[in-house]
Image: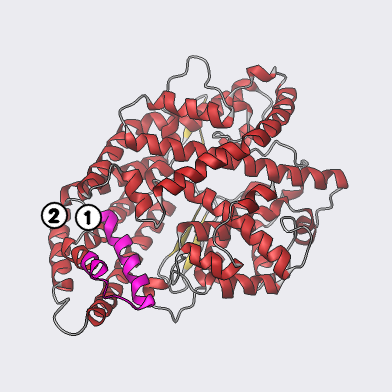
Amino acid sequence: MRKILILAIIALCCFSTFNYVGAAGSEEKDFAAFVKQYETEASKLEKDLNTAQWNAYVTGQEEDYKKMSETSLNWTMFHSNKEAYDKLTAWQKSGKITSPDLKRKLRLLINAYGPYQFSKETIKKINEKETFLQQTFNSYRGKINSKEVTERDIYDILRDSSNDDERKAAWEAQKGVGEKVASELIELVKLRNKGAKELGFNNFHEMTVFFADQNYEELISIFNNLAETTDQKFKIYKAELDKKIAARTNKKIENLAPWDYSNPFFQGESLGFAPDLENKFKNRNIPLIAYNFYAGIGLPLEDVLKKSDLYEKEGKSQHAFCFDMDRSGDSRILMNIRSDADSLSTLLHESGHAVYNLNINQRLPWIYRTPSHISTTEASAMFFERFTKNPEWLLKNLGIQTTEEERQGLKKQQILEDLLFCRWTIVMFNFEKELYENPDQDLNSLWWELAEKYQGIKKPEGRNAPDWASKIHLVSSPVYYHNYMMAALMVSQIQHYIGTAILKTDRPYDFDVTENKEVGRWFKDKFYRTGASYNWNELLKRSTGEELNAKYFADSL
């Protein structure tokens, strides 16, 4: 009953909000008034949604998830207003919005409203299904020999255990959530497709790419090209890695199983070529290390870390997130920190999102006070995350001395991780594409076919389980993973620019920026400050001198 009342109230509010458009003045004057009214209402709804989501992820409590569901529905229903969307598309077709500023705002608003132009019934069903699945993921704890284990426990076992049965049990414990969510997730995919088809798209995958200001055919071409250009080098590195893994596990290479690698999705590998530095991370104050580093380059995190929730607790989400609560300086991080290299790397990553949010010019209109694109904020995060593999950075920030052999190992490890992540994103991109094209196909087999083709990982003999469904992004961030790879391409381009134009080094992909405030200023002034004022490719051109160019990623390998 309460949700029905909310729907009625929101519908009335949406009607009254936009009923005046076109009453007087020029097209641009009317549109500017529309934007102002939108910002007033959307800013409150977004803050309510972010607050509710933060509380739910931190506490895991049923009432907090109910509140998250309600605020999510309010946000969605607000943007589902067909009258408002029709006015936006009419303004676009009229060609009378000519100001570059207003044209950019119009594009952002069409992208904001477009994905929600579903029927009210479809919206409500999607919201309920997403909330249920997110709560299931966040509260899930796998079991090994009847004992509950956290996701961090599972990763530790995969990395450290020499017992094959224990590693297998840990891997299966991580995949266990797939059994719990698979059927509901397929229903969610069909609901998303139903909404997309209502808008004239073939499926939700195509629709999401369109409203993310990306070209569908170009994206397919980019990933096909990445698969081809990285194939040979990937196979060389994978073969060498497999020799090391086989020696460690006392197995033949052809008998290696998915649980013999340290990451359950093989999207990275901590047991590759890097020296074993884990003992040097024990008892370290991970937040303090991150705080000192970012402060040293002029991007302080003090307020962020004070508001963050960084350590494990019962019921809390086991994943890492950065929340921009209100586009006005309240940015915070949710993590489950332990004293290890992975935690430091993840905190540097999430902090890269936070400093982006904090350094967007607060004088900009609210609609611009957010990153230019998903891929640009991921590029910021990934740029800083990489320094945990940089010997000079480790020395300056943790006092860790490395030998020449260890330095070469760290460099090789970074290339390995870039290759593994690239191949993993190819799997995710193609899987989601085919998932939304045909959710009734044999998804269990499809997942392993793609994993073997692009990652060289074979399905365990006799296994037929929804391992694909154990990836939370399919629920919480659908059609998102390809943006990580787009970000990786951006990172290489940014590295090359900073290395050559600012640091004047002949090693443009292998440098440290500790205490370098000039680099911090570049990020603030050239990459963060303008927020969403420019399209992602225009931002990249303005900051590095050219639009996205994948050759830098290839060069970095």
Q: Can residue 60 be seen in this view?
A: yes
Residue 63 in percent (x, y) is at: 30, 52
Furthest-top residue in this view: 462
Residue behind mark 1: 117
Q: Is residue 255 left or right of residue 180?
A: right
Q: Nearer the viewer, residue 555 or 423?
A: 555
Asked whether the viewer can see residue 301, the reply is no
Residue 10 x, y percent position in the rendering: 17, 63
In the image, farthest residue toward the bottom: 25
Residue 300 sits in which quadrant?
A: bottom right
- Residue 504 versus residue 486 in the image, above or below: below
Please count the marks in the image.
Answer: 2
Please indicate whether residue 525 sits to the left or right of residue 273 in the image.
left
Residue in the picture at 26% in, 80% down: 28
- What amino acid is labelled 1 in the image? Gln
Judge by depth and name the residue closer to the eye, 179 or 15. 15
* Residue kind at label 2, given as amino acid type: Ile
Residue 189's spot in the image, x, y percent? 30, 39
The reply to whether the C-beta atoms of the residues labelled 1 and 2 are less than 8 Å apart is no
Instruction: Give the overall secondary structure of the magenta segment.
Output: helix
Give the secondary structure at mark 2.
helix
Residue ID at (82%, 44%): 406
Which quadrant of the structure image shows residue 392? bottom right
- The magenta span reads 89-116
Camera-near label (1 vs 2) is 1
> How is the rendered protein coloured?
secondary structure
Q: In which quarter of the image is residue 49?
A: bottom left
Mark 1 secondary-structure assignment: loop
Question: Residue 4 bears which disc, if any?
Answer: 2
Q: Residues within 10 Å of mark 1 (few under 14, many from 20)?
A: many
Q: Is residue 35 above or below residue 190?
A: below
Q: How far apart are marks 1 and 2 (CA)?
A: 19 Å
